[in-house]
Image: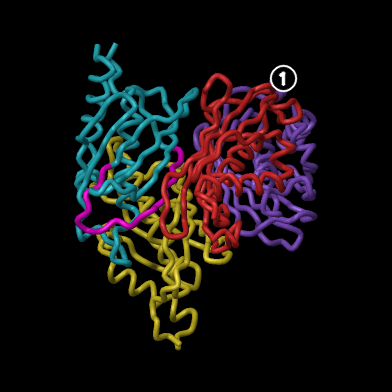
Chain colours: A yellow, B cyan, C red, D purple
Amino acid sequence: MKSPQELAEAVVQKMYDNDPFSKWLGIQVSDVEPHRAVCSMTVREEMLNGFGVTHGGVAYSLADSAFAFASNTVGVVSVSIDNSISYPAPVRAGDELKATAELRTSANRIATYDVNVVNQEDSVVALFRGTVYRTKKEHFPDNN
Amino acid sequence: MKSPQELAEAVVQKMYDNDPFSKWLGIQVSDVEPHRAVCSMTVREEMLNGFGVTHGGVAYSLADSAFAFASNTVGVVSVSIDNSISYPAPVRAGDELKATAELRTSANRIATYDVNVVNQEDSVVALFRGTVYRTKKEHFPDNN
Amino acid sequence: MKSPQELAEAVVQKMYDNDPFSKWLGIQVSDVEPHRAVCSMTVREEMLNGFGVTHGGVAYSLADSAFAFASNTVGVVSVSIDNSISYPAPVRAGDELKATAELRTSANRIATYDVNVVNQEDSVVALFRGTVYRTKKEHFPDNN
Amino acid sequence: MKSPQELAEAVVQKMYDNDPFSKWLGIQVSDVEPHRAVCSMTVREEMLNGFGVTHGGVAYSLADSAFAFASNTVGVVSVSIDNSISYPAPVRAGDELKATAELRTSANRIATYDVNVVNQEDSVVALFRGTVYRTKKEHFPDNN
């Protein structure tokens, strides 16, 4: 049977291996533990929007990946119900973004995570908050 | 001087021409009028996430593009403050998504838009609500 | 066995009878049907905040009551997970507010409702969106 | 001229003196400094809703008051644009709630604050996040 840390790492590895969108964005998972995940990526020119800054969907997707990884570390398939994001500062091509997702609250089958996204100067470029519903499906049903 | 409809179309055309991320996603703008934009896209295999369904960032990005287009139709550069999204149904590879962004409320320099994203069966797959701040910068400063 | 309309009305009546906070606010329920509720109230001087306008918690509470009534009309105890609200216009003492709560989406045990709050001039003063989790507990267990 | 701490305290005192709704709820302000405010209250029977737990508007109003105080401490009238709240645990009559509002991000005229509401056992009963627009109006125009 996997320890909580082993389970967290195995779940995230399995999810990441099957996540072509995170890979296309260049997302790397740099740190995983139960209820926590850190992801990073470098913004490319092709991720800009019509204002010459990065499309809001990029920082959102990075945060959403970190959120999905963090919220599934406990081994139960956890699906997003709703998320919110605010954008205190623009993201530019070449920026190195780091998203840290951490559990805030958990009750019954509902849990809320915060994800802060910072750039290479440690300035916050996005504040993300997401809520998941924990299904009864396990990532590794034989892990008993 | 452009009419409101001409201005709306010119702004969106200018934004879209400089938006490689929306183009990479395959987003098409199918309808534009003042305070309103409709965008569509077809989900590709490379947009899946670790659950075999579409990464939450894809529907978000489509909604965010429609929101950005709709909120800038009035000719003033309008930037997102914060957005929220909920996911009532999963999105699968091959799904054809359509996002309709419309103004809900406007006051002083703040405006709120709703974006509904439906699939080819007209089922809602994402409810998005976004708030913009209207800057004093115009998209076409000479349009007077 | 109650019809859907009878069940909706019975649930709201039962909830309202045990809701002293809604009563203190002066909230009246004016229209109920499955997945929908309309509530109204008149703003009193004692509901103002430090700016001479109505405390944000007042319009929120009205919207939240309408949301709770609407989301429980189906007879299953449904509890709020998270809500968001925006305030496009100030509310003043004497204003007559009307909140209309309607179902937007429903999937598995999660449902999202929109509540629009307008004043006596039909201007939108609050946009509220709420998500509930449907428990397995029924309001009238013997209704079969 | 007031120091930042003196200004923060003077603004909150002025706001609280004119806030009958916060007073009716029994809200006390226990700690104020620039960009931060702590408020507390005891839940009364008359604040319950139709489920025998506290109406969601009560914890919201407490959080919103703390948010309003914290965001105005800098001396500029700051008005709420939109807020979100989640409810990880029920609140019961007799509970002693404490809301701590703190600045998260600030950019141009927009700022985001987090407010955590805990009960007497230090369990989180509400997570609130609010965004303000900073007007150009000062609370004490002569403070120069």
Q: Position of residue C40 (x, y in %)?
A: 62, 31
Does B66 sit left or right of D48 as displayed?
A: left
Task: Name which residue type carries label 1.
Answer: Asp
In the rendered image, the quadrant that contains the C terminus of chain D is top right
- Residue shown at 62% from the left, 22% from the top: D137
Does C103 sit left or right of A20 as displayed?
A: right
Q: Which residues are magenta?
A: B81-98
Q: Is residue B108 above or below residue D13?
A: above
- Residue shown at 80% from the left, 42% from the top: D26
Q: Position of residue B80 (x, y in %)?
A: 41, 37
- Residue shown at 30% from the left, 35% from the top: A51
In the rendered image, the quadrant that contains the N terminus of chain D is top right
In the rendered image, residue B21 lying in the magenta stretch gets the answer no
Q: Which residue is mark 1?
A: D142
Taking depth in this image into account, of A139 and A121 the one nearest to the observer is: A139
Give the residue at the far front of this rendering. Answer: C1
Q: Quadrant of residue B5?
A: top left
Q: Is residue B51 above or below residue C41?
A: below
Parent chain of label 1: D
